[in-house]
Image (cartoon, helix red, strand yellow):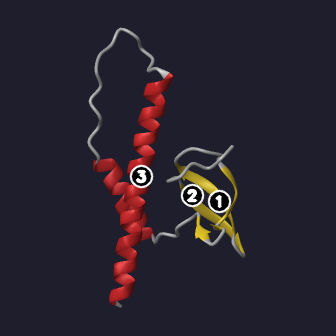
Amino acid sequence: GVLATGSLVKEVALIKDRLQYKLVSGTGPEEGWISCKIKGKSTAVKVSPGELVLVAQELLEAKEPEVKEVEEDRPTEEEIASRRAAFLKEQKRRLATASRLRQDRDAAS
């Protein structure tokens, strides 16, 4: 399996640019190893506990999407994929915001 973009993971070990993780939220393997950089680009962003709390609070406060009543109980594969994509996009946006806040804070100090 592949760890999805925007997933939150907990560091178990860090050896050079390899991160052993446990999945906190998102999709992908429950645990494993990832490269922190590929071709000079970061694939993982470290966040402070405060930033993680900020992201978690935003997720909890996010408005629940309206659910339309339908005769079928199960959503279609397209609906599932669309919802997953929207969730991951929003999670990525929130992580970027937390990272930007950290950079602004670091620049100010």
Q: Nearer the viewer, mark 2 or mark 3?
A: 3
Q: Amino acid at mark 1?
A: Tyr
Task: Kindly identify which numbered label has been placed on residue 21.
Answer: 1
Q: Residue furthest bottom?
A: 109
Contact between labelled residues 2 and 1, with CB atoms less than 8 Å apart: yes
The spot of residue 4 in percent (x, y) is: 57, 48
The spot of residue 30 in percent (x, y) is: 64, 47
Question: Toward the viewer: 89 or 73?
Answer: 89
Contact between labelled residues 3 and 1, with CB atoms less than 8 Å apart: no
Task: Kindly identify which numbered label has been placed on residue 91.
Answer: 3
Q: Residue furthest front?
A: 39
Q: Amino acid at mark 2?
A: Val
Query: Which quarter of the figure is the C terminus placed in?
Result: bottom left
The Cα atoms of the two marked residues, 2 and 3, are separated by: 13 Å
Q: In the drawing, does residue 54 fall left or right of residue 6? A: left
The Cα atoms of the two marked residues, 1 and 2, are separated by: 6 Å
Residue beneath the point at 35% across and 8% down: 71
Q: Quadrant of residue 82?
A: top left
